[in-house]
Amino acid sequence: MPEDPELPDPGRASGSGHRKLRLGGRDLLVDGDGFLVRFDDWSEEVARDMARADGLEELAEPHWRILRFLRAFYQSQGKAPLGREIRQGLGISLLEIEALFPGGLKGGARRLAGLPNPRGCL
């Protein structure tokens, strides 16, 4: 797994567009797209707060199954799974993920799972 980036002084914004948000009862750094800066800052409580901010009031078991899979895959492989790896690992399609998460896979599921921002993804 890639190392966490060096954290700037939490009292001020960094030059990289990071900002502090209150998530899971803690002040955490997120990037300009709302992705956690540090993978290890994630918790289920953080995911719930992010989901509520997206208008998703409750994360049901299908959501948690996807979030846990994404995190476990990233921890073991050092990268986010591709679409075919998600289908093989979970038996669900990207369209099903798109329907469950506002923001789809990138801006929804990956962000709520605490994975790094896939800036190259459209």
Image: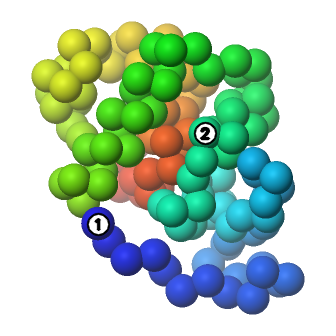
Q: What crowding class fits label 1: few (fewer than 14 Cα within 10 Å), some (14-19), or many (20 or more)?
A: few
Q: Which residue is mark 1?
A: 1
72 and 85: which is toward the camera: 72
Determine whether the residue tagged by mark 1 lies in a helix, strand or loop: loop
Q: Is residue 85 left or right of residue 56?
A: left
Image quadrant in which the N terminus is located: bottom left
Q: Is residue 55 left or right of residue 2?
A: right
Image quadrant in which the C terminus is located: top left
The mark found on residue 44 in the picture is: 2
Residue drawn at point x = 37 percent, y = 77 percent = 3
Please tell me whether residue 41 is drawn above or below residue 108 in the rendered image.
below
Q: Is residue 82 left or right of residue 6?
A: left
61 and 50: which is toward the camera: 61
Residue drawn at point x = 46 percent, y = 14 percent = 62
33 and 11: which is toward the camera: 11
User: Sequence-wise, which precedes: disc 1 or disc 2?
Assistant: 1
Query: In which quadrant of the rendered view does residue 120 lie?
Result: bottom left
